[in-house]
Every structure is written in structure tokens, then in C-alpha cells.
Amino acid sequence: MESKTLIWILALVVALIAVMPLVDEWRRLRMDDAPRATAPGEFAALSQGVTHYQWIGPLRGPVAVCVHGLTTPSFVWHGLAEGLALMGYRVLIYDLYGRGYSDRPRGAQNRAFFLRQLDDLLEDQQVTEDFLLVGYSMGGVIATSYAGANPGRVRQLVLLASAGLVPLPGRMLRFVKTIPLLGDWLMYASYPRTHRRCTEAERDLPSSVTGITDLQQRELDYRGFVSAVLASLRGVLDDDLSPDHQSLQRIGVPVLAIWGRDDTVVPIAAIGHLTKISRSSKQEVIEGAGHGLPYTHTEEVLKIISDNHRSGLN
């Protein structure tokens, strides 16, 4: 009898451990009108859901569109967008689905999913001219994919610590991406703690975005963020950008790639791969920089972009 009781107790403990990450997700806040009431910018009801966006800069001038990365929404661009605005650009920043103040639609987050969001937003905002397209981390995958599909619309492609050129490091990451169900559970159970630890490690770094660590960690307050990260890991971040870069080189779309020497998220080996598949791409390395280029090394990034304007890339 005692043995059976012990087995039941152990089974109950295992069941509680298994269900707690899902309960934690269910208890998170919904992204709805309440948090959006204090959001900067505007909202567009697009074909896949509501998208939060902002225009920064003059009312007239060339357009720059900035696409953020896997876990840090459009606030990551605030410092860089102000700098681009001083160059004369009208800068459009927006939250990818599953992040920031945008909706959290379920399902795959693949190339078609994100390109449709960008196409919808550009149509909604009546952006018909060609523009500067800037992509950071996972946003580099989306921006490169968009440029490859719409080369006539992209004046210049600027990539900051872009994913999609070399595999992202980490055994747990590979496990979560490739193993269904158990990978899902592990993501819900471990990712919130990992996200907090990684963002906390950057708290004392200089940043052009005030309070960026707290803003990054606030994403965990809302339901759908963790599942969006997982869907992107299994979707758009599995894409190989080699065909896109080769196509852009043939067509003649200027590509400027900027890397952080000390980046541990996107390995510096990406430089060599991009050189191999697209010799016309201009590449620059910022010494002492990690993965947070848009907000930790804003001035250096802006200078590189400005210098390459003068050298005829734009």
C-alpha cells in the first residue's frame, strides 16, 4: 500500500511539473486594448492581425524601413531611427507579430508569414517608392527575403548582425527546434529564465534605448511571446539565405552588412559565408561589439551607414 501511495505521489509531482509551464503561459496577460492604450505610435488592422508601427523623422524624404529581431520589438530602433531621421529619412518601425504591441496569431512563422505582414503594412501606409531596408538579427532574414522577392523596391539593404547565414549555436536550441512536443515543453519551461538571464547580462551596457533591459523582459508578461519565438526558430530562422544573396548580387541591389566582433549569438563566421556567396556585399566589423548593435553601438552603426552613402552605395 505504501509503495502504491508513493507511486501516486510521484506521478502527481511529475504531472504538476509538466503542466506548470503551460499554466504560467495561460496566466500571462493578453495583448489587447489595455496595454495598447499607452503605446507610442499607431495601429494597423492587417490581414493577419493588428500591427503596431511608428513613423520617426521628417514628413518628407526617402523612406527607411527597419525590421527588428527575434525577441526585441521595435523599441530597439529608437536610437538608430533618430539618427536616420537626422540624415533626412522618414523611418518606419513596427512590431513583428508575437512581439511588442502587435497581435499574436497562431501558426507557423515562416518567410511567407513575415513578408505578408511587411507587404500589408507598406500597402496600408501607402509606401510606393523604393526605400532603404534595415534588418537586425532575425530581421536580417526577413529583410533579405523581402529584398530577394522585391528587388525593385529596395534602394539598399543594410544588415545588422544578420541571422540566416550560419547556424545559430547551442545544443538546446537545436533540440527545441527539431523535437516536437518535448521541445515545446522545454521551451515554455526554460526560455523565460534564459531570456531574463541574457538580457540582465546587458543591463550595464551603454544603450541608446532607455530602459531596454526592462522593456525586453516585459515581453514575458504577455501571452504568445514564447510561442512566437519558438515558431520563428522553427520557421523563418531555418531558412538559408544563400539563394537570396546570390540573386541580389546578380540584380545589383547594394548590400551593407555590419557585424559585432564579440557577437556570441550570430557567429562572426557569417562574414566569410557572406563573402563566399556575395562578393559585392560591403562588410564592416565593429570592434568590441556584441549582438546588440542597434542600441549598444548606435553611433558607430550610423557612421558606417553614412560613410557608405558617401561612397555611392545609396
Image: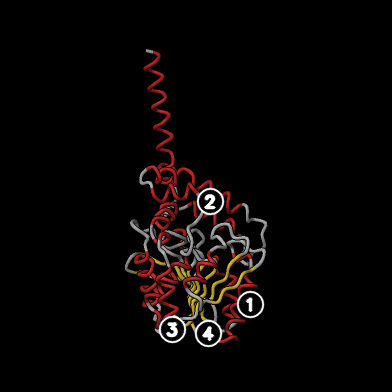
**What's the mark number on residue 130?**
3
Query: From mark 2 to mark 4, how far is it between C-alphas?
Result: 36 Å
Q: Earlier in the sequence, mark 3 or mark 1?
A: 3
Q: Earlier in the sequence, mark 4 or mark 3?
A: 3
Residues 305 and 51: in front is 305
User: In the image, what residue type sits under mark 4?
Assistant: Asn
Closest to the camera, between mark 2 and mark 1, is 1
Q: Disc 1 designates what residue?
A: 303
Query: From mark 3 to mark 1, how far is it between C-alphas?
Result: 22 Å
Please tell me which residue is depicted at 51% across the width and 50% down the height of the picture: 170
Residue 70 in percent (x, y) is at: 48, 60
Q: Earlier in the sequence, mark 2 or mark 1?
A: 2
Q: Is residue 55 visible?
A: no
Residue 182 in percent (x, y) is at: 39, 42
Q: Secondary structure at mark 3?
A: loop
Query: From mark 3 to mark 2, how far is it between C-alphas?
Result: 36 Å
User: In the image, what residue type sits under mark 1?
Assistant: Lys
The 10 Å Cα crowd at callout 2, few under 14, some 14 to 19, many 20 or more, is some
Are circles 1 and 4 on residues that touch, CB within 8 Å? no
Q: Quadrant of residue 238?
A: bottom left
Q: Quadrant of residue 232?
A: bottom left
Q: Quadrant of the N terminus?
A: top left
Query: From mark 2 to mark 1, how far is it between C-alphas?
Result: 30 Å
Q: Disc 2 designates what residue?
A: 195
Q: Disc 4 designates what residue?
A: 314
Closest to the camera, between mark 2 and mark 4, is 4
Please tell me which residue is depicted at 51% across the width and 64% down the height of the picture: 137
Query: From mark 4 to mark 3, how far is it between C-alphas?
Result: 11 Å
Residues 269 and 119: in front is 269
Q: Earlier in the sequence, mark 2 or mark 4?
A: 2
Left/right placement of residue 241 relative to residue 88 reads left
